[in-house]
Amino acid sequence: MSSYDAIAELYDPWSRSVTEDVDFYVAEARRAGGPVVELGVGTGRIAVPVAAAGVPVIGVDSSAGMLEVCRRRAAKAGVERLLDLRLGDLRDPPVEERVRLVTSPFRALLHLDTDADRRAALASAHRLLVPGGRLVFDVFAPSRADVEETHGRWLEREPGIWERADWDVERRVLTLHVRGRDSEAAMHLSWLPVDEWRALLEATGFEVVACYGWFDLRPWAGGEDTVWLARRP
């Protein structure tokens, strides 16, 4: 049982307003063609729109609860036949297919705690790609202002959905508590600076194609968010 099962039913209401990345990932999937492997597919916030665009998705997640919500979401959208959902670990996903695109949206790689885990996940993504295939993912590293403004405070993210960020800057770990009317859960996210992500990508055989500062493809210029495009040579 995954610790993220507890947040499965809260996840969609909590992330309802997060839409800025959807068109970006749909465009990447259309460009690559299918199937696309999505590591950390969660409740299908990205995978269902990708499938609705006609691109098959192999979605991997360690949470059975998240995958169940994803199945319901896909069925409601009428795209369940285009989603192949698999319970498994991002570090060793149960995928034998070779594809042109692997994605890990909405900061999913931050759920990995150590460089060994990150290397394993990136190496697995590399293994799944055909030569010339691309890995696309987004992550963040908080600014001092963000930490100071949010640390230890309950903030209403959506109506009736509250979150509290507890930042451990020394360990570079965020514990994010999410609370709804009837339930509460927590997520642990571990961040890295840009130079360390680049080093991990290169160490696992990737060629960095681009590092953007947002989903509108603006070049990264020192902000909190990074969107990475990396290629298997």
Image: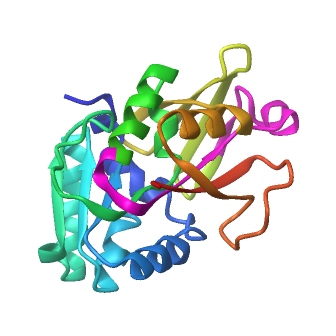
Total residue callouts: 0
Q: Which residue is nearer to you in this view: 77 or 180?
A: 77
Image coordinates for residue 30, horizontal then vertical, percent? 40, 82
Task: Please determine whether, in this image, residue 28 is positioned above or below residue 171.
Answer: below
Q: Which residues make up the magenta segment?
A: 127-155
**Residue 66 visible at all:** no
The structure's colour scheme is rainbow
Quadrant of the rendered structure where residue 197 is? Answer: top right
Q: Residue at 39% across / 64% down in the picture? A: 45
Q: Residue at 36% across / 76% down in the picture? A: 50
Q: Which residue is nearer to you in this view: 190 or 195?
A: 195
Looking at the image, which residue sits at the far top?
A: 170
Relative horizontal placement of residue 150, taking residue 138 as reference (left or right) = right
Image coordinates for residue 121, horizontal then vertical, percent? 39, 36
Image coordinates for residue 80, horizontal then vertical, percent? 15, 73
Q: Residue at 84% across / 31% down in the picture? A: 148
**Residue 144 visible at all:** yes
Quadrant of the rendered structure where residue 94 is? Answer: top left
- Quarter of the image with the N terminus is top left
Task: Please determine whether, in this image, residue 76 is positioned above or below residue 104.
Answer: below
Quadrant of the rendered structure where residue 218 is? Answer: bottom right
Task: Please determine whether, in this image, residue 174 is positioned above or below residue 79.
Answer: above
Residue 151 on the magenta segment: yes
Image coordinates for residue 61, horizontal then vertical, percent? 27, 45
Task: Please determine whether, in this image, residue 194 is positioned above or below residue 230.
Answer: above
